[in-house]
Amino acid sequence: MEILICILPLPIAYILDLILGDPRWLPHPIRLYGNLIYTGEKILNKASFRFAKGALLTIILCLGTFLFFYGINTFFTSYPILYITFNSIFLFYALANKSLIQEGKAVFDELDKGIIQGRKRLSWIVGRDTSQLNEQQIKTAVFETLSENLSDGVIAPLFYYAILGVPGAMLYKMINTLDSMIGYKNDRYLNFGKFAAKLDDVFNYIPSRLTAILMIIVTGKIHRIKEVFSEGKKHSSPNAGYPEAALAIILDCRFGGPNYYHGQLVDKPYIGFKDRILGNSEFKTVAKINHTTTFVCVAGIIVLKLFL
């Protein structure tokens, strides 16, 4: 019975994500995370010792997040229904597979209406300048985002849930949110956000590679694992290149290349081998890969918890 109580939140959260995604009307803890980070940054990111202040904010928010969820979980241990409900809800909040696919599809749908609409919708989900992108570059950006965020938004939270439960999953989400808000290499955040960015790199090291491995397993491309890892290393990020490389190998296409970020041209390396035109129908293939990879990861965690 105890093992079922521990396992049940995972399939429940997975099904909730499949059904609901991330509806805008639903209160979300990540918005609270964002408000806390914004307030802390506004107070601390000034004058001297910015690296130390950024590290302090990161440590306080991460430790506070983990202890908050750990404390509630400990209290709810004696109340199975509350334990299952609480963990199901917050693990659901930690997952973003359906919303990720929905956002990608929205870009393709808008692109069907015209290049201007496609560029505008893409700007909602990527950091690069989209104003001059052509149709091929828009589709490439969507697929890069779907693969990279499969790791950040799905597999990584599941990985830390498997190790540390909901406190681990929500700790990861705080780290990832910190990186997305203050982990930039610009004048404002270079020192203040450096600790958060490095912490995010550390926490994503295993999940990013696990994501790539799962993607090529579910698509029957395991024999190309060496190519995935050799191509993944080309990315400037220590982690983002691996799921991107996996998808490029699976689709037999090429990602990366020069792009403008915040007005500056960044000469990113190409990942993958074949420079070809991406078709609209391939979005369904990529969505299926994301869904299948997520399902296999969820099923794998359930099996491990049942038998280990």
Image (cartoon, grey):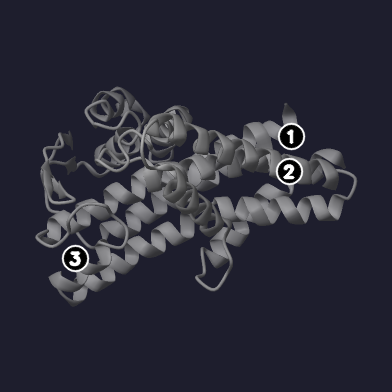
Structural crowding at the residue carrying mark 1, measured as other residues with C-alpha within 10 Å and reported as few (<14), some (14–19) or many (≥20): few
Quadrant occupied by the N terminus: top right
Q: Give the number of the disc on residue 17.
A: none
Which residue is more in the foreground, 50 or 157?
A: 50
- Position in image of residue 86 (x %, y %): 74, 54
Amino acid type assigned to the residue bearing label 1 in the image:
Leu
For label 3, the SS is helix
Mark in front: 3 vs 1: 3
Amino acid type assigned to the residue bearing label 2 in the image:
Ile
- Position in image of residue 226 (x %, y %): 30, 22
164 left or right of 282 in image: right
Q: Give the residue pinned by disc 1.
A: 306
For label 1, the SS is helix
- Position in image of residue 239 (x %, y %): 35, 32
- Mark 3 and mark 2 lie on one chain; the one further toward the N terminus is 2
148 left or right of 262 in image: right
Mark in front: 3 vs 2: 3
- Does the CB distance between marks 2 and 1 fall below 8 Å? yes
Tally the numbered discs: 3
Estimate the spatial distance between the alpha carbons at disc 3 and disc 1, rounded to whole Å.
46 Å
Estimate the spatial distance between the alpha carbons at disc 3 and disc 2, rounded to whole Å.
42 Å
- Position in image of residue 71 (x %, y %): 77, 41
Q: Give the residue pinned by disc 2.
A: 7
Q: Give the residue pinned by disc 3.
A: 119
> Does residue 302 show up?
no
